[in-house]
Amino acid sequence: MNEPQFTIEEVTDPVDVARHRAWHEKARRNAEWLETHWADLLPQAHGRFIAVAGQEAFLADTRKEAVARARVAHPDDEGLLSQYVFPPGGPRIYGNRWKMGSV
């Protein structure tokens, strides 16, 4: 059986470290913006995809479309976030229904 393998490396290059920190800061700002603006986005976001870039939301029926809109508006924001917004109510699961004694 093949065991999953992974490698852990320490990144010490100052350019790589600075680039990652800048990305993380942009993503953090977008996440905080989204957290404080959910009330403005719902209910129209239910059942759709959302992308957040430049502390601005972009809704679309596909992830690809939402991300494309966000990238056009904010091409330099590497901290873009995207996700699907599930409709309220959650999944509906139906079990097999059979009548006892019908066998």
Image (cartoon, rainbow, N blue to C red):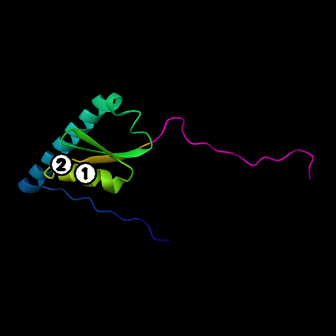
Within-10-Å neighbours for mark 1: few <14, some 14–19, many 20+: some
Callout 1: SS: helix
98 inside magenta stretch: yes
Residue name at image x 13 percent, y 51 percent: 76
Boundaries of the magenta span: 86-103
Q: Main secondary structure of the magenta part?
A: loop
Task: Report x, y in % for residue 99.
Answer: 86, 45
Residue wearing tag 1: 69
Amino acid type of the residue that numbered disc 1 sits on in the rendered structure: Arg
Q: Are marks 1 and 2 in contact (CB under 8 Å)?
A: yes
Q: Quadrant of residue 13?
A: bottom left
**Furthest-bottom residue in view?**
1
Asked whether, in this view, residue 83 is left or right of residue 26, the answer is right
Residue name at image x 21 percent, y 52 percent: 71
Task: Report x, y in % for residue 66.
Answer: 31, 50
Residue wearing tag 2: 73
Residue name at image x 44 percent, y 67 percent: 3
**In 3D space, how far apart are the residues under numbered discs 1 and 2 (Cα atoms)?**
6 Å
* 47 is higher (above) or lower (below) than 89: below
